[in-house]
Amino acid sequence: MDQFDFCIIGAGVIGLAIGRRLAHTGASVLLLERNHHYGTETSSRNSEVIHAGIYYPTGSLKARLCVAGREALYDYCQRNGISHRRLGKLIVAGSDQTGELEALQAKAEANGVSDLQWMDQRQLRALEPQVAAQQALLSPSTGIISAHELMDTLAGEFEAHGGLLSLSTGFEGSEPRGEGFAVRVSSGGEPYEFHCRGLINSAGLHATRVARRMRGLAPEAVPELHYCKGHYFALQGRAPFSHLIYPMPEANTAGLGIHATLDLGGSVRFGPDTLYLDALDYRMDDGRRDSFARAIWHYYPQLDPGRLTPAYAGIRPKLAGPGEPARDFLIDQPLAGLINLFGMESPGLTASLAVADYVAAALEDRLP
């Protein structure tokens, strides 16, 4: 039986970041991906925003890993020539939301985000003339990134340090064996079995299905996962903003509201909304244009809905169901040498390098 130090299931941005981190230690690492290419699901269907760390409960993994990951990600992009821009974003609010905006600022500061700037209506209008709001918080450390360039760089570095990336390879099951795990996969329709000392489940939308195929894992160690779809609409024509524009977050932070982001080419897209699904479905629904327009008019009243065109849809792997309070990342070690990552939604892209460090620290006793 072939032997590896580590096997990672799922080559999204987090799986790639973990692979890169472990490969740098000199470990032999096998990274499995069920699709024909890495990063084709949640990692490539999001807003491509580098988040500051504003919204998450203080002390939570989301808060800690977002703040640490943000700085690591900016540094990594700078050193590797990955396209990104530190544009800054505005969280806009009405006069009746002063208390909520103050609470958000206090939470951000408790999380280590100390650069937020309060803006009154006059200052906001000078900065973004087409934005309608009474007040706002400016977050200078929020930015945008090319997620695809990031993943290409992580994958290249992983392989350059001896990592083995196996595409079109599905995880079939595992069981504890010796000081590690026997793992069964199907690669190109052919069965393959190997042994690894450490096993990391970073399968994103499929993390619970993967976990249920692991022998020795108690059923209660596998949480329920919910699919939450978000649509994006692009704005035709010239961009009316130079910053990212966010409304106040939704109740229970199910989402951050239908916000305006800019891509690296300067075009604007709006989204995502929140729609819970029973099964994966990436089809765009043009019928949601009207609900998008109504949400956008709150902060951009000059919007012509005819300029909105369907762009794409993404799906987040949420631990919280409809109407439930937001849940933290769940990075669990139910068995020695096994790490399960559940609910790795936003800010997973921003936090990816910090998540990789966190996982490597948890598996320190299995490093070469």
Image (cartoon, rainbow, N blue to C red):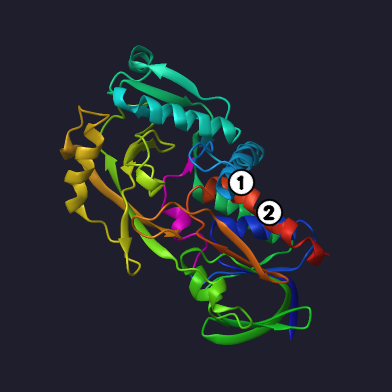
Pointer 2 residue: 358
Front residue of 277/83: it is 277
| Dominant secondary-structure state across the stretch colored magenta | loop
Picture quadrant of residue 361 = bottom right
Does residue 208 appear left or right of residue 269 in this picture?
Answer: right
Query: For the image shown, how many numbered marks are present on the structure?
Result: 2
Q: Residue at x 79, y 58 (%)?
A: 25
Does residue 127 appear left or right of residue 160 in this picture?
Answer: left
Q: In the image, is residue 146 above or below residue 184?
A: above
Picture quadrant of residue 197 = bottom right
Q: Which residue, as the protein is rendered here, is positioned at the far right?
A: 368
Label ID, residue 65: 1
Check whether the beta carbons of the residues at disc 2 and disc 1 lie within 8 A of each other.
yes
Q: Quadrant of the C terminus?
A: bottom right
Residue 177 at x, y = what percent? 73, 84
Q: Residue at x 36, y 21 (%)?
A: 135
Q: Residue at x 60, y 39 (%)?
A: 67
Residue 49 at x, y = what percent? 47, 41
Q: Which residue, as the protein is rendered here, is positioned at the far front?
A: 99
Q: Residue at x 52, y 34 (%)?
A: 107
Q: Residues within 10 Å of mark 1 (few under 14, many from 20)?
A: many
Residue 94 appears in view: no
Q: In the image, is residue 342 above or below residue 4?
A: above
Front residue of 275/216: it is 216
Which stretch appears magenta? 36-49
Mark 2 or mark 1: which comes first in sequence? 1
Q: CA distance from mark 2 to mark 1?
A: 8 Å
Q: In the image, is residue 3 above or below residue 25?
A: below
> Which SS class for mark 1?
helix
Residue 190 included in the magenta stretch of the image = no
Residue 3 at x, y = what percent? 76, 78
